[in-house]
Amino acid sequence: MRKSAFASLVPIFLALCLLVSCRADLFPDDVTDPVAGSTEVVGIPSSKTKVIILSGQSNAAGVSLVETLSEADAARYASGFEDVRISVTNEVSGHNSDGFVKTTTGWGDNTEGLLFGPEVGLAEELSSSFPGEKSYIIKYSWSGAGLEDKFLPGRTGYQNLCRAIDDGLEILRNQGLDPEVVAFCWMQGESDACFISTAKHYGNNQKTMVNSLRERYGDFLFLDAGISTSWTYYARVNNEKKKADCSLGRCVFINSNYYGLKVSASDPAHYDAPSMIRLGHLFGEQVSLHIVTDY
């Protein structure tokens, strides 16, 4: 199986991170704002095709169990959203869509379709906020990957993320569409929150990544979800995220903990199914607040 050896080490690495004893931090308290950052509204010409990037580590990949959804929700999300298409590249499992498909459950961090990520709630919100309009999600994830070691410019994750975006945009252009990256949804930081050395550099590292991606894909809206309280230096990372987002412009920090997102009782590293749906909704709500179709 593709990268099976690496995939088997990810849970062990995460468990070790979670077991590290907490200690005093320069930011001992989590961010209290529900959201922080830009309030700007951007008009997108109706001739443009809206593209939203979804990226990060395992909570972006999706480790929430489809079977724990209610029967009604499971049926609704399995049928999916025809007007919101998704292209998926999963660095660990290799569960890739090979082009754009209807957004449904089953595109999480395994190959059997048992898991899902934020794309489901995001697609639901986009479908509601932009009725009659097509939207496209390009999802690239790498479970266990830190910002500092994988997602900075020149690093493997960054390069593969750009390749996934470029491939998705090329597919849309070949269909006669005029795609524009309007938003980038980022669910990452857990690995960097395991150590103070990476947590304290998170803000500057994030600014480096965003600035580099904007040079390549335009001045998109950057939507940045906070991480859960499971991680030793979660408060430092969340504060670093907020600082970076408030200084960059056209960035929004979404305080996942304020909105009550919960990790699974049996898996303290990953969000449970209702919280994963809610995370997608939070991303989608911010897209609809900041992006309007300019006819």
Image: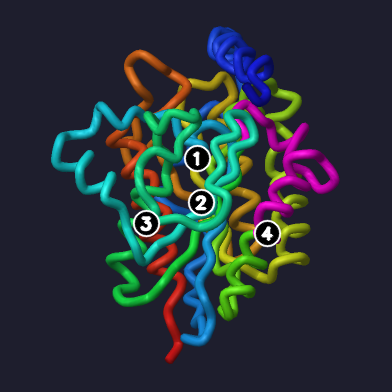
Left or right placement of residue 84 versus residue 216 in this view: left
Q: Please determine whether, in this image, residue 196 is positioned above or below residue 206.
A: above
What secondary structure is found at the residue carrying circle 1? Answer: loop
First in sequence: mark 2 vs mark 4 = 4
Residue 276 rendering spot, x and y as whole percentages? 36, 38
First in sequence: mark 3 vs mark 1 = 3
Do the residues bearing badges 2 and 4 touch, measured as CB atoms within 8 Å?
no
> Which residue is the site of mark 3?
123
User: What's the residue at 55%, 8% (across, down)?
Assistant: 19
Q: Quadrant of residue 135?
A: bottom left
Q: Which residues are magenta?
A: 142-167
> Which residue is the site of mark 2?
253
Report how far apart the C-alphas of labels 3 and 1 lie in the structure.
20 Å
Residue at the limit of the structure toward the bottom, as seen here: 295
Q: Nearer the viewer, mark 3 or mark 4?
A: 4
Report how far apart the C-alphas of labels 3 and 4 lie in the structure.
20 Å
Q: Please determine whether, in this image, residue 251 is positioned above or below residue 228.
A: below
In the rendered structure, which amino acid carries the disc numbered 3?
Ala
Q: Which mark is residue 226?
A: 1
Q: Which mark is residue 148?
A: none
Q: Nearer the viewer, mark 2 or mark 3?
A: 3
Report how far apart the C-alphas of labels 4 and 1 lie in the structure.
28 Å
Q: Residues within 10 Å of mark 2 (few under 14, many from 20)?
A: many
- Please tell me whether residue 162 belongs to the stretch shown in magenta: yes
Report how far apart the C-alphas of labels 2 and 4 lie in the structure.
28 Å
Q: Quadrant of residue 195?
A: top right
Q: Residues within 10 Å of mark 3 (few under 14, many from 20)?
A: many
